[in-house]
Image: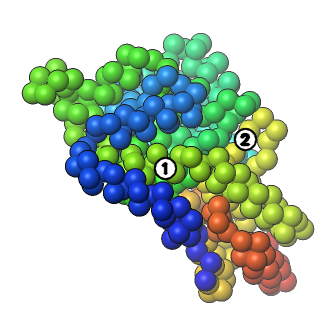
Amino acid sequence: MIPLVDLKAQYAAIQPEVDAAVQRVLRDASFVLGREVEAFERAFAAYCGVPHAVGVASGTAALHLALQTCGVGAGDEVITTPHTFIATAEAISHCGARPVFVDIDPATYNLDVARLEAAISSRTRAILPVHLYGHPVPMDRVQAVARRHGLPVIEDAAQAHGAAYDGRRVGAWGDAACFSFYPGKNLGAYGDGGMVVTGDAGIAARVRMLRDHGRRAKYAHEVIGYGERLDALQAAVLGVKLHHLDAWNAARQRAATRYRDLLAGVEVVLPPDGARAQPVYHLFVIRTAERDRVLADLRAAGIGAGVHYPRPLHLQPAYAHLGYAAGSFPHAERAAREVLSLPLYPEITDDQLAAVATVLRATVRACQSSGHVS
Ligand SMILES: Cc1ncc(COP(=O)(O)O)c(C=O)c1O
């Protein structure tokens, strides 16, 4: 069995450090916000190369609070991609605003910046690009469009801790950026967690208030806020793991390079590898027209392949009210039919990578010889 991700292997590698951090929090008995959270906020801000970071309860909360703080409210529109996890769009909806989708660039699976400007209307209030699979969006081009229209950019960096574009880390490009620390992420907690990072002290202060019931001081509630705080146990674990993030991302990159070598000549489309992008391979996503058959064969061989994501957001029942039809975003719809995530995690061994490649090669050949793959 080769899992899609292996969190047990990661814990085994860092157990003494993690256990010591957890014990420290238990002895301290300060469980919500407090100095563990503050220390991790400082460390993560420095990692991203921004002055401010605010710990929150999840990536979804980070997106919601960042959007609200940037002025997104009822009746507004926010432009994003339909090929992402639903939390991206939910955060827009939680502000009372409407997600406006633009199709993806089929080469990168990210929002196609060439289509961005045409989607801007008088109601557009923000742009929300997603660095999907750990592959960064060309942020210079997003920023150029946003500046022309006076719009804030909020990065969804939930899958891209440590990724960079033109050498500048994601999180350091937008007016604000949002991270998830869901356990399987490149930097994952042992539960839920999230972070808003920003260069703007005003945005940071407002997110800080909103995450904690609209207050800066106990029982002095200046605005109506939320209970969306990061807890100290998660912050302590994340503080330990942050020291390993660059090494883990490098191991992911090595595994991705190995897959590229092993899969040379196999008729599947490999992940993008642009010169200006420095991806962190949250997922290693290939595409093939015979995805469902290949997926079934991999799973039958004990390989934990996955699909991220099988249905684009504009075709989800939850977003039927937006009125998009099948065919609205052909590249996103095709990606949903064809993408396949292969096992990839920092601890994956060469033998495991080779085993996945062997099964994949055989499966794709079998599909070809039965005339399914063009
Ligand atoms: C692209 C994207 N955005 C947002 C989220 C939401 O993060 P969380 O699960 O921490 O709420 C996730 C992760 O689940 C994600 O992958």
Figure quadrant of residue 32: top left
| Label placed on residue 198 | none
Figure quadrant of residue 165: top right
Residue contact at pointers 1 and 2, CB within 8 angstroms: no
* Beta carbon of the mark 2 residue lies under 8 A of ligand 1: no
Q: Secondary structure at mark 2?
A: strand
Say if residue 83 shows up in the picture: no
Q: Secondary structure at mark 1?
A: helix
11 is higher (above) or lower (below) than 68: below
- Measuring from the top left, give residue 59's x and y in whole percent: 41, 44
* 5 left or right, relative to 232: right
Residue shown at the point (21%, 23%) measured from the top left: 216
Q: Residues within 10 Å of mark 1 (few under 14, many from 20)?
A: some
Q: Residues within 10 Å of mark 2 (few under 14, many from 20)?
A: many
Q: Which residue is mark 2?
A: 278
Q: Quadrant of the C terminus?
A: bottom right
Q: Mark 1: which amino acid?
A: Val
Of 205 and 66, which appears nearest the observer?
205
Figure quadrant of residue 94: top left
Q: CA distance from mark 1 to mark 2?
A: 24 Å
- Measuring from the top left, give residue 109's x and y in whole percent: 65, 48
305 is higher (above) or lower (below) than 311: below
Q: How many marks?
A: 2
144 is higher (above) or lower (below) than 249: above
Residue shown at the point (41%, 57%) measured from the top left: 20
Q: Which residue is mark 1?
A: 240
Residue reaching furthest to the right: 265
* 124 left or right, relative to 340: left
